[in-house]
Amino acid sequence: MEMSGPQIGRALVVIVDDRVSAGERSDGTGPLVTELLEEAHFLVDGVVSAPGDVVAIRSALNTAVIGGVDLVVTVGGTGVSPRDVTPDATTGVLDRPVPGIAEAIRASGLAAGAVDAGVSRGVVGVSGSTLVVNLAASRAAVRDGMATLTPLVPHVISELSGLDD
């Protein structure tokens, strides 16, 4: 596969799904997020899965941050059910929230008819020099969320790297 344009940065995808992490179901959104990130000129380090457990999600996020990726996109666990703990886990690793991006993703998702995106509790913020973004799990929410996110990320990465000084 040929990549056009310069790489914006490195990314990691975290799928939060009990059945995917247990190997009981295949992951349908990781490849989609990877494709969309690559189209946006990211080098995707990989896709990992975690159950809907605060400790497991925090561990995946901390590993990504320590590994030096520029962007982590989590998919799933952003709703209101008892197992939807991705925003709670993410908040525990963030140094600074970036609520405007989360609000834009919710508003855009709802306008596009992705109800799970519109009612998502997903958060966005910075941990160290990594931008962490929570997306709802439907393919519509992922597609719309990525379309909203990808034009904003280069600016955030540039600010975090200090290249815009």
Image (cartoon, helix red, strand yellow):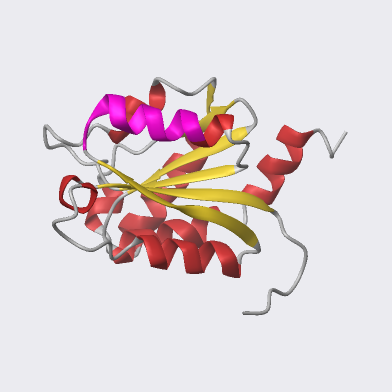
Q: Nearest the camera: 121 or 6?
A: 6
As drawn, 23 above or below 35: above
For the question of whether residue 150 can be seen, the reply is no
In this view, the residue in front, 3 or 94, is 3
Q: Looking at this view, name the residue that lies furthest to the front.
A: 23
Q: Which residue lies furthest to the right in this view?
A: 165
Name which quarter of the figure residue 70 lies in.
Answer: top right
Q: Give the side of residue 17 with respect to residue 47, left or right.
A: left
Q: Residue at x 56, y 50 (%)?
A: 11
On screen, residue 44 above or below 92: below
Q: Where is residue 56 in the image (x, y as percent from the top left)?
A: 30, 31
Q: In the displayed image of the protein, which residue is found farthest to the bottom?
A: 1
Secondary structure character of the magenta stretch overall = helix
Q: Which residue is drawn at 27% across and 41% down?
A: 78
Q: Total of numbered circles in the picture? A: 0
> Is residue 157 within the magenta segment?
no
Residue at 22% x, 63% y is: 26
Taking 84 as reference, is 19 above or below it?
A: below
Quadrant where the N terminus lies? bottom right
Residue 33 appears in the picture as rendered: yes
Segment tinted magenta in the rendering: 52-63
Task: Give the image location of residue 46, x and y in percent.
Answer: 48, 54
Identify the image quadrant of the C terminus. top right
Which residue does the image show at 13% across and 56% down from the upper left? 24
In the picture, measured across the screen, residue 108 lies left or right of residue 158, that is: left
In x, y percent, where is residue 33?
A: 44, 61
